[in-house]
Image (spheres, helix red, strand yellow):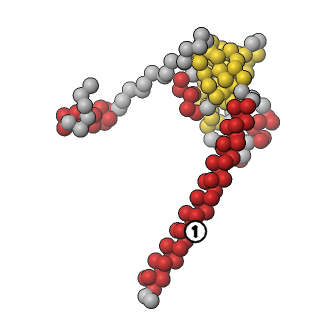
């Protein structure tokens, strides 16, 4: 066999092994996430709160309790999390919000939220209405030009 085919076979074997390892790690992570979601759903409570402020900030700067900061993995300590400051009853509390609902949370308004510990999983308006979605961001110059070109070419239906 030529050296080229040997090298290609070795690379192919390494790629197959890497894919198998990633497959099993993915399954393990998926099971772990399902267990965590079940725990969050079991501990969930509906609370009425006034949202004071919301920001994406590092966990060290967020104002969360020191015990929470110490329990987070080292790699996560520098990543930014969606943090919400809210008044729940007479207390002002710092909470972590789920990423997919962070943009829908209204600031300076009273809402009903499903809270599990310090984690907000769902937000509704005060009277059971869903919270208003965030206004859409302005499109940049390049995106507008691409959309106009697509409309003229017939690739996209005209609005």
Residue at the image point whose x is 35% and y is 32% from the top: 140
Q: Is residue 5 visible?
A: yes
Q: Quadrant of residue 94?
A: top right
Q: Is residue 64 visible?
A: no
Q: Is the C terminus in the top left, top right, bottom left or bottom right quadrant?
A: top left
Q: Nearer the viewer, residue 62 or 3?
A: 3
Q: Position of residue 42 (x, y in %)?
A: 73, 31
Residue 93's place in the image compared with 22, above or below, is above
Residue sitting at the far top: 127
Q: Position of residue 23 (x, y in %)?
A: 58, 58
Residue 75's place in the image compared with 23, above or below, is above
Q: Nearer the viewer, residue 106 or 58?
A: 106
Residue at the image point whose x is 46% and y is 77% from the top: 8
Q: Position of residue 5 (x, y in %)?
A: 44, 82
Q: Nearer the viewer, residue 100 or 93?
A: 100
Q: Label 1: which residue?
A: 17
Residue at the image point whose x is 29% and y is 32% from the top: 144
Tell me the SS state at disc 1: helix
Relative horizontal placement of residue 141, taking residue 34 as reference (left or right): left
């Amino acid at each position: 066999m030529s050296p080229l085919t040997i090298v290609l076979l070795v690379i192919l074997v390494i790629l197959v092994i890497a894919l198998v390892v990633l497959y099993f790690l993915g399954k393990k992570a998926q099971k772990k996430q399902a267990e965590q979601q079940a725990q969050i759903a079991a501990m969930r409570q509906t609370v009425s709160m006034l949202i004071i402020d919301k920001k994406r900030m590092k966990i060290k700067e967020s104002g969360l309790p020191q015990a929470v900061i110490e329990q987070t993995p080292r790699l996560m300590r520098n990543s930014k999390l969606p943090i919400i400051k809210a008044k729940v009853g007479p207390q002002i509390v710092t909470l972590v919000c789920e990423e997919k609902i962070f943009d829908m949370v209204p600031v300076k308004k009273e809402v009903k939220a499903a809270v599990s510990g310090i984690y907000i999983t769902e937000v509704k308006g005060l009277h059971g209405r869903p919270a208003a979605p965030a206004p859409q961001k302005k499109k940049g110059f390049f995106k507008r030009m691409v959309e106009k070109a697509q409309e003229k070419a017939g690739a996209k239906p005209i609005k």
